[in-house]
Amino acid sequence: QPARPSDTAAAASSSSSSSSSSSSSPSLASDGTGEKRRGSGQFFQRLQAIFRILVPSYLSKEFSIVLFLSALLIARTMLSVYLSDLIGTNIKHLVTKKWSKALRGSLTFFLVSFPGAVINSLIKHTSHILALKFRCRLSLHINESYIKGVNFYSACNLRGMSDVDQRVTQDVQVFCEEIADMYSAVFKPLLDIVLFTNQLGRVTGWQGPVLMYSYFALSAWIKKIVNSKARFSKLVSQESQLEGKHRAAHQRLITNSEEVAFYGGSTRERTLIQDVLRKLYQFSKWHRNVRALVGVGDQLLVKYWASLAGYFVMWVPILLNPSDKSTSELTRDYVRVSRYLENLASAVGNLVLVINQLATVAGRTKRVSEILELVHELETQPRTPFTRREFESTEKTNPYLEGIDEWLAEWEQCSNSERLARKACMKMHKPTRTLPGGGTYEQGEIIEFRDVDIVSPEGSVLAKDLSFKVEAQQNVMITGPNGAGKSSLFRVIGELWPLSCGTVVKPSSQDLLFVPQKPYLVDGTLRDQIIYPDSAATMANRGVTDDDLAHLLALVDPANDILSTWSFDDDKDWFRAFSGGQKQR
């Protein structure tokens, strides 16, 4: 077998997978700490490698946007410090009844609000632009190697990379948005902490910052324990994988819409898509429940209990300086400290919450890094021949071919009994349907066209006044040049196209079988490929067994290649597992 990505250059991917599984396995719990450390180191290594792609040099446009965003964040922080001092001074003027100065301070606050609003809006806009630039840069980097030569074929068919489309589109998009948001979420709080800690120390002395940072250190320690239990990285990765499966199910239906329609597989496809949707819903609901529970703790730590700790800090100017300052000055200091604490608590709280965001980014980083590592391996390492396995040349025989004539006679007898029961029901209720403004469908035991026009969706008349009859046990070959309407005739019989005029007589859908030009392989087991569009439950209700399926398969696979390789319960990507001839069988 060809080597998977994790076997060579992308060995880090394999270690990440083993880390995720071992952390949830009781037998490996004793080594959990080491695994988590290795996983954390691998995450930052992968993130660093991606950053080299997102910001390739100091002269790149991305770096210029990062500098501009940094300047905006600094300006907003300086503005917040200025407003905190301004509000404290205004309160002092109000307490001392200096109305003219209080009015002047209020007017200053009004004027400063305009640049503040512009800065806040520019920060959001610049973050969005940065995310778009990151996405464009990363997508182009992937496409340069992925869509080159036969790399895209090797990635999907030889290396076993699942949901590549999901990884190179939605995962890349969300990852870039999270990284752009995280820059603001880290840079701004760090700057706020430095400035507001300095301002707080000037009012309260060293006691105020020490008290607050002691509480924040305790909060960070508690958050680390909670996040290790929540495993957000694994939750995000699994949810993204289920999103990819749901998207692939719809894409498969769109790509094979004509084949599914000919088979009458709408019910089966709807069941498959709804099963995937249900799994996605259940997992996403569990993910949201975990985040809600963690969010309760975050609110307690970052908002309510942090405010309680802040109250003690606000008492410091009063307790330590009971007589040195006037009431107005103490009021000013109290308001200033409250504003400093509000911003400082918000900054440190945001940093604590970044731990949650890092766990989310880690799951997305893993999926994006795996595709990057794969395309890097395909681009840099030479393709090696497959490992050769020698087998003894023996003549294959299919045991189900023994006594096949007797089995076929019994099978035909059962099928005829079902058919006779349907015919008896049809004689009692012979349905006739006339399409509004179109032709008429009648149910019968033959196929007959009477004065039928075959009209394409573009309005072209492919056949006019077509009349013919096909009796039971009669073989008919339809020939003609391209675009003459050969396939279109079957689309009319299968009711994929509406009947424009005339009358079509045909058996019931249960007595008609269309074999599309392109084989269609449903998502499911080997059994599902044979019984489609029926389900395993329908098969059991009709009394059909796996032994019956094996006899039917022996008619088209006398060498028994399929059943000697897979069992009926095997669930594979059959489009890649089957050869061209096996798909036709």
Image: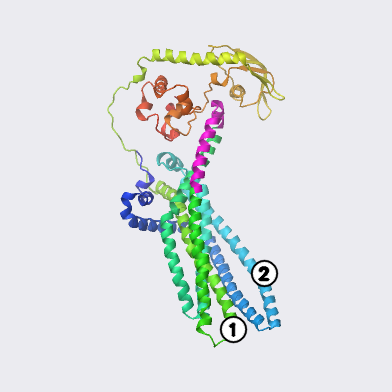
Image disc number at residue 312 = none
Vertical relation: 366 (above or below) 213: above
Which of marks 2 and 1 precedes in the sequence?
A: 2
* View extreme (left): residue: 392
* Circle on res. 329: 1
What is the magenta segment's predominant secondary structure? helix
CA neighbours of label 2 inside 10 A, class few (<14), some (14 to 19), many (20+):
few
Q: Residue at x 40, y 29 (%)?
A: 568
Residue 57 visible in the shown view:
no
Point out residue 214 in the picture as x, y percentages from the top left corner: 44, 72
Q: How far apart in space, not on screen, are marks 1 and 2 (Cα)?
A: 29 Å
Under tag 1, what secondary structure?
helix
Percent position (x, y) of residue 87? 62, 76
Foreground pick, 414 / 290: 290
Residue 376 visible in the shown view: yes
Name the one closer to the observer, 352 or 310: 310
**Residue 186 vertical placement versus 514 (above, below):** below
Q: In this picture, is 169 found above or below 523? A: below
The answer to if 270 sits in the magenta stretch is yes
- Residue name at image x 50 percent, y 53 percent: 138
Q: Which mark is residue 114?
A: 2
Residue type at mark 1? Glu
Give the magenta part as a residue range: 257-285
At x 52%, y 56%, the residue is: 178
